[in-house]
Image (tube, rainbow, N blue to C red):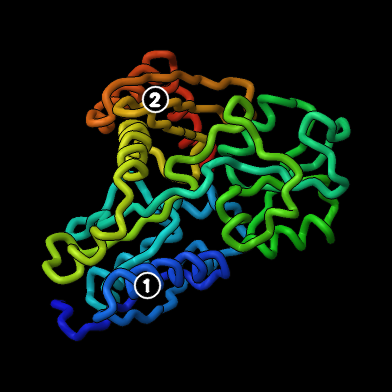
Amino acid sequence: MRNDSGKLVIGTRGSKLALWQAEHVKATIQEKFSEWTAEIFIIKTKGDKIQDVPLAKVGGKGLFVKEIEEALLDGRIDIAVHSMKDMPAEIPDGLCIGAVPAREMPSDVLISKDGSEFSQLKKGAKIGTSSLRRGAQLKHARADIEIVPLRGNLDTRLRKLEQEDLDAIVLAAAGVKRLGLERRITQYLDDSVMLPAVGQGALCIEIREDDPVVGPVIEALDDKSTHTVVVGERAFLHRLEGGCQVPIAAHGRLDGESLELTGLVADLDGSTIIKDTISGPAENAKELGTRLAERILEKGAGPILETLKQEILT
């Protein structure tokens, strides 16, 4: 579909956070390009529809993006706005990442019922999260804690903390901040305890490849520094063939023209974590991410990933 109507249709999930993200992109487009109007089109994904099963058990990649990508491919929408951490390592033929806007804080945060920080939580404390990445790292830091599966949007998870038998929950700082709920944060978790998900805190604006009309508009929303770091993190994920339901984490930092990438692979109970850091020229972000993954595999991550696939499938 060639869009020359002066209107862009933005596809998004319907959660409060997803709508904030889409509205943010819409406002930026209309600020930069007054001749364009934009409207938001809500699409329900498989991950939204299935709420009573842990995400890892639902199976497949792209649980929160596939239906939106299908709408982009068949022309119902012109732009898709996703959380970058929901993006699988592989992007469908015909689509591409058109822009990565400036990143919000990539860290995870702890929100506890009584205001206790992670190290102060009682022995055997129950922490709510459905992220295998978060659960593994929390168990690695404190083997005594109990991980309780927790699904739902951000508001739902905060409500469950108050209403259910939980001592704390772990969420992405970016979502909490974007919805103006910073006051609820008990503790920002340091990278040494909780390495973020690949792309966490960044948005992904996905478009059709070689779209002569939409491409140049969306390119104006790109933040080069964020995009560079995300390329490195996603190359790490791609080499490990991971999705968002595997305990894989990576976080990159730019220092001038140099990029430092840290990545890890963990087993489900957190008893084993394989972690490494690499640095080099930022222009080689993709190669650095791939090389970091190779080093992690050389340290023994391969058998862990194979075991994970079997455990998740059964």
Q: Residue at x 50, y 20 (%)?
A: 274
| Front-most of residues 36 and 140 | 36
In this image, 17 relative to 238: left or right? right
**Label 2 residue SS:** strand
Q: In this view, does 218 lie above or below 244?
A: below
Q: Which residue is drawn at 23% across and 74% down?
A: 74
Image quadrant where one finds the N terminus? bottom left
Q: Distance between the residues labelled 1 and 2?
A: 33 Å
Q: Where is residue 49 in the image (x, y as percent from the top left)?
A: 53, 69
Q: In this view, does 14 lie above or below 130?
A: below
Q: Do the residues labelled 1 and 2 touch (CB within 8 Å)?
A: no
Q: Position of residue 267 (x, y in %)?
A: 56, 28
In this image, 33 relative to 297: left or right? left
**Label 1 residue SS:** strand
Q: Which residue is drawn at 33% across and 49% down?
A: 223
* Res 260 label: 2
Asked whether the viewer can see residue 61, the reply is no
Q: Where is residue 126 in the image (x, y as percent from the top left)?
A: 80, 42
Image quadrant where one finds the C terminus? top right
Give the amino acid type for the residue marked by disc 2 in the picture.
Glu
Circle nearer the N terminus (1, 2): 1
Give the amino acid type for the residue marked by disc 1 in the picture.
Gly
Q: In which quarter of the image is residue 260?
A: top left
Asked whether the viewer can see residue 150, the reply is yes
Number of other residues with Cα within 10 Å of mark 2, as a class: few under 14, some 14 to 19, many 20 or more: many
Q: Mark 1 points at which residue?
A: 11
